[in-house]
Image (tube, grey):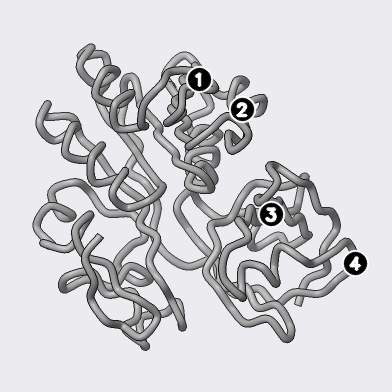
Amino acid sequence: MVRVTGVADETPTVRTIRFEDPGMAAALPGQFAMVWVPGGGELPMSVMAGDPGGAAFTVRRHGPASTALYGVDRGDLIGVRGPYGNTFDVREGRLLLAGGGTGMVPMMRLAMRVADPSRVVILMGARTAPEVIFERAAAALGEVVISTDDGSRGEEGTAVDAARRLLGSGRFSAAYVCGPEPMMAGIVAEARSRGVFVQASIERPMKCGVGICGSCCMGDRLVCSDGTVFDGDRLAATGEFGAIYRDKAGIARRY
């Protein structure tokens, strides 16, 4: 159990929950924790950097568990276990880091790990301007490109459209992405078509986080124990990535 040390609103529906935990503070980009809110359920969350010695979760209010986490306040206790999962293979050269919505969390951790802003272009995708998060913090970590579906901030169009333009410049040796799966599938396909190494951090429903329940299966892989980070060739071979998701009952459905 950890105590919440601070809460900050990022957008009208997104909030960052800060807490102190040295183990979580040392989590690698792409790793996640299982977070329990007393009375509200448990859910997987990417680990965000916090204050020195601390960490944070950035949560969008959506279902019952995420709404419960969104509703905690400074001084409340939450249960945290992990970190679980693998991390990114950071290549040399210029890197494209693309995040959609709260998928920006592992991209921010990855940019911090690279520690050379001249090598990094951070693509931030959102539906509309008020949903853009971490813009000011990202500007200190690399060149920032923003795309919004309605054109209210940055370029008009999807993150896939912006990635297509950026990757088409031939400037990048690798690309990394996290966000809604159809968006990730589009960017992975764009990178692979140009021979650019690409990895994605996958978000799927999880109940255990340690490879027991099978809720997060994707093809013959479990996102929690084999990922969350997969390279583009592995994702293309699954037959599910960007095409099929599983609901909370484990039933396969098409996007």
- Horizontally, residue 120 falls left or right of residue 9, namely left
- Which numbered disc covers residue 144? 1
User: Comparing marks 3 and 2, which lies closer to the viewer?
Assistant: 2
Q: Quadrant of the C terminus?
A: bottom left
Q: What residue is at 31 percent from the left and 20 percent from the top? A: 93
- Horizontally, residue 82 falls left or right of residue 16, namely left
Cα distance between the residues tagged 3 and 2 = 17 Å
- The amino acid at mark 3 is Ala
Q: Which badge, 3 or 1, is on the more N-terminal residue? A: 3
On the question of residue 203 being in view, the answer is yes
In depth, the one of 85 and 105 nearer the eye is 105
Q: Which badge, 2 or 1, is on the more N-terminal residue? A: 2
Image location of residue 186, percent across then percent down: 23, 40
Query: Element under label 1?
Result: strand
Q: What residue is at 48 percent from the left and 36 percent from the top? A: 126
Q: Quadrant of the N terminus?
A: bottom right
- Which numbered disc covers residue 135? 2
Image location of residue 39, percent across then percent down: 72, 86
Cα distance between the residues tagged 4 and 2 = 28 Å
Whether residue 165 is situated above or below residue 181 in the rendered picture? above
Q: Are marks 2 and 1 in contact (CB under 8 Å)?
A: yes
Q: Which residue is mark 3?
A: 56
- Which numbered disc covers residue 75? 4
